[in-house]
């Protein structure tokens, strides 16, 4: 009976260690994904501003011509 109890306790401890390892890996993965998404978000904002500025300038020209004409 003591041998079974010891084996069960050892298995429980091993399970806890494996669980902790999986959680640590998941936490690292989450952090990596957050970083990647933040980078993508920043790149997308830069691209939007890059494209919107010329459109705004063209719109201003069109509006100015419309008011003149």
Image (spheres, rainbow, N blue to C red):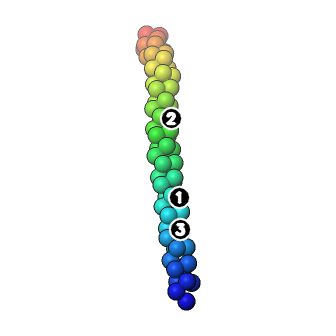
Q: Dot 1, how many residues are within 10 Å of its Cα: few (below 14), some (14-19), or many (20+)?
A: few
Q: Dot 3, how many residues are within 10 Å of its Cα: few (below 14), some (14-19), or many (20+)?
A: few
| Residue at mark 3 | 14
Residue at the image position 51 percent from the left and 54 percent from the top: 26
In three-dimensional space, the C-alpha distance between marks 1 and 3, rounded to whole angstroms, equals 12 Å
Tell which residue pokes out farthest to the bottom in this image. 1
Mark closest to the chain's N terminus, 1 or 3: 3
| Residue at mark 2 | 40
| Residue at mark 1 | 22
Q: Estimate the x, y position of residue 62 in percent, counting from the top left.
A: 48, 15
Q: At numbered mark 1, what does the secondary structure look like: helix, strand or loop?
A: helix
Mark closest to the chain's N terminus, 2 or 1: 1
Mark closest to the chain's N terminus, 3 or 2: 3
Residue at the image position 49 percent from the left and 43 percent from the top: 32
Which residue is at the front of the view, 17 or 55?
Answer: 17
Q: Nearer the viewer, mark 3 or mark 2?
A: 3
In three-dimensional space, the C-alpha distance between marks 2 and 1, rounded to whole angstroms, equals 27 Å
Q: At numbered mark 3, what does the secondary structure look like: helix, strand or loop?
A: helix
Kindly tell me whether residue 66 is visible in this rendering: no
């Amino acid at each position: 009976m003591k041998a079974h109890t010891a084996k069960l306790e050892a298995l429980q401890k091993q399970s806890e260690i494996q669980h902790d390892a999986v959680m640590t890996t998941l936490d690292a993965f989450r952090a990596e994904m957050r970083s990647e998404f933040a980078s993508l978000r920043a790149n997308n904002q830069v691209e939007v501003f890059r494209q919107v500025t010329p459109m705004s300038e063209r719109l201003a020209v069109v509006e100015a011509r419309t008011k003149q004409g």
